[in-house]
Image: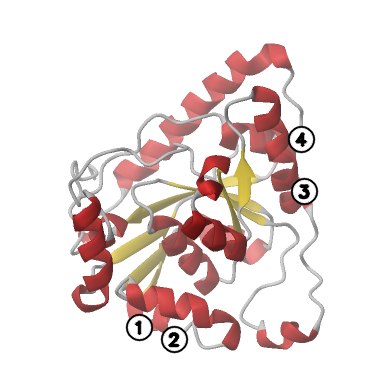
Amino acid sequence: MRVIDPREVNSSFRTFEHLPRRFLHFLMGGNLRITVSDEAQKWLESGEAGILAPNHSAYPDPPTVEFAGVVLGLKTKFMAKSTLWWNPVLFWIFWFGNFIPVRRKNRKKAKNSLLPAKKHLLKDHSRKGGFLSIFRKDRRARKGGILGIYPEGLIPHWKESFDREPGKFRVGVILLQYATGVVIIPVFQFGARKVMSGGFFKKFFGVITAWYRKPLRHVHFGDPIKMSTGQMEPADGVYENVKQDAERFKEAYMAQWRELDPNSFEGVVIDEPPVL
């Protein structure tokens, strides 16, 4: 297993392009540890496309996972529900982060929301051009895109600052793999709730004091999971199979969750520590 300590993470945000990330990383405490499984390391070195599937626990976990990806040489696009664009603050964050909106209420619109995600995953990113490319030597040339999507689809509601096991999974991540045939990389993040959790005032004071408290956040990239062997478009009558695959995916996902070593997450309190 590859381990990247917080000092090495901080040294990764040195270029002009990374200034906004470096500032936000500082506001969140600047204390991020990354671990990569042996199989995930092989996937990184292959340069293939991938769907990152992190657990969702708090608003700070998308930038936490994005920061971890940057350290590993990944440029990740995330998907988020379209209603979040109505928030005047989140709108600019999503616009800057190049997020992809998902319209959930209508099945047809939700399916159409996957088209830009599919295009990004299948696009050849191995060619980098333009003036800014001279500042991107730390980013590996990849044969496909990297997309982040939360299998749970939403943040579970609880006020405590500890992390819990992921809740019910939606089918979006499976539909994306059906459409692209790329592997799913389970990503386990812990500690984002130490930055922001609870009610309004607790979240507010958590955010403005995180730079001083330096809560430890940990991101682990697990073994790739592949539920389908190639590209295929699910018809309207096969959604039961999609749901079954989503359940099978969660079983494989949780099997890796429970194999994690709790001692590697020093400073992070987990509600039900994984069983070794």
Q: Amino acid at mark 3?
A: Lys
* SS at mark 2 in the image: loop
Drawn side of residue 185 relative to residue 77, left or right: left
Disc 1: which residue: 7
Dot 1 amino acid type: Arg
The residue labelled by disc 4 is 231
Return the mark for residue 11: 2
The answer for how far apart the CA atoms under marks 3 and 4 are is: 13 Å
Counting residues from the start of the chain, the first of labels 1 and 3 encountered is 1
Q: Look at the numbered discs 1 and 4 and tell me whether their residues touch, using CB distance below 8 Å.
A: no
N-terminal-most mark, 3 or 2 = 2
Q: Earlier in the sequence, mark 3 or mark 4?
A: 3
Q: Which residue is mark 3?
A: 119
* Cα–Cα span, label 1 and label 3: 36 Å
Mark 1, secondary structure of its residue: helix
Spatial CA span between label 4 and label 2: 39 Å
